[in-house]
Amino acid sequence: MRRQLVRELSDRGIKSKQVLDCFEAIPRHYFLDNAFAEQAYSNTAFQIGSGQTISHPYTVAYQTELLDIQKGEKILEIGSGSGFQTCVLCEMGAKVFSVERHKELHLKAKNIVRQLKYNARLSFGDGYKGLPTFAPFDKIIITCGAPEIPEELVNQMKVGGIMIIPIGEGVEQQMKKIVKISDGEITIEDFGVFKFVPMLENKVK
Ligand code: SAH
């Protein structure tokens, strides 16, 4: 089933072998409630509790490919959710820091990441604040739909760093690649349209 999913992702245009290998390596069914386990390898999004969803495999692969991860890079993820994307980033060889605003999801994700023996640092809190203690980051990935580019997160990026972020307030968002070319200067490039749950500010619970 995992191989079938990898073929589907490749047919849809994911080219990076490293990214495809992650989908072969990580047991996606661990991240879903039992009732959904059978469908874990279909290319769909699922409820993971607290009204949130685990991202579509294609979306995870697409964002990861855009991040262009090099081994050892320090990456900040906003929206740990199920922890699946976190594990993909670890599998790519990154040093991963991830923030989740839902306590219950945070604890569940932390547990599963540990069970799978990945070494990410998961935090409970508001992603809009980033993680100043561990900044600056080489790359930032936002896995919820943001109304605009969060300035504080740009501040926590290294010069030359990349942020992959879905922007939009409705049900659909435009994927954007932000490159910090100097302090106070960024470039923005548009990619496809995706659907994410909203990135909510000051809603830690
Ligand atoms: N990367 C996740 C995707 C989960 S969906 C995965 O692979 O499963 C997006 C997540 O972003 C949700 O769990 C939601 O609770 C979280 N989120 C939304 N706004 C947030 C914020 N301001 N800070 C941190 N997490 C946030």
Image: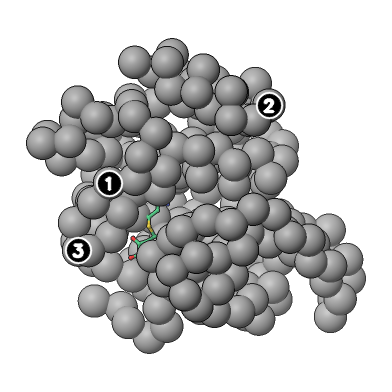
Where the C terminus falls, by quadrant?
Answer: bottom left
Image point (83%, 71%), residue name: 186
Distance CA(mark 1)–CA(mark 2): 24 Å
Which amino acid, mark 2? Lys
Q: Return the residue nearer the eye: 177 or 89.
A: 177
**Quarter of the rendered image showing ligand 1:** bottom left
**Circle 1 — which element?**
strand
**Circle 2 — which element?**
loop
Q: Position of residue 41 (x, y in %)?
A: 33, 26
Quick check: can you spot residue 40?
yes
**Circle 3 — which element?**
loop
Vertical comparison of 3 with 185: above or below? above
Which residue carries the number 1 mark? 46
Q: Position of residue 167 (x, y in %)?
A: 59, 70
The image shows a total of numbered marks equal to: 3
Distance CA(mark 3)–CA(mark 1): 12 Å
Q: Is mark 3 within 8 Å of ligand 1?
A: yes
Image point (44%, 37%), residue name: 57
Q: Which of label 3 and label 2 is nearer to you?
A: 2
Which residue carries the number 2 mark? 15
Vertical comparison of 57 with 184: above or below? above
Image point (86%, 76%), residue name: 185
User: In the shown orientation, is residue 26 left or right of residue 92?
Assistant: left
Extreme residue in the left direction = 35
Q: Position of residue 79 (x, y in %)?
A: 42, 60
Quick check: can you spot residue 139?
no
Which residue carries the number 3 mark? 50
Which callout, 3 or 2, points at the residue further toward the start of the chain? 2
Q: Position of residue 101 (x, y in %)?
A: 33, 70
Distance CA(mark 3)–CA(mark 2): 33 Å
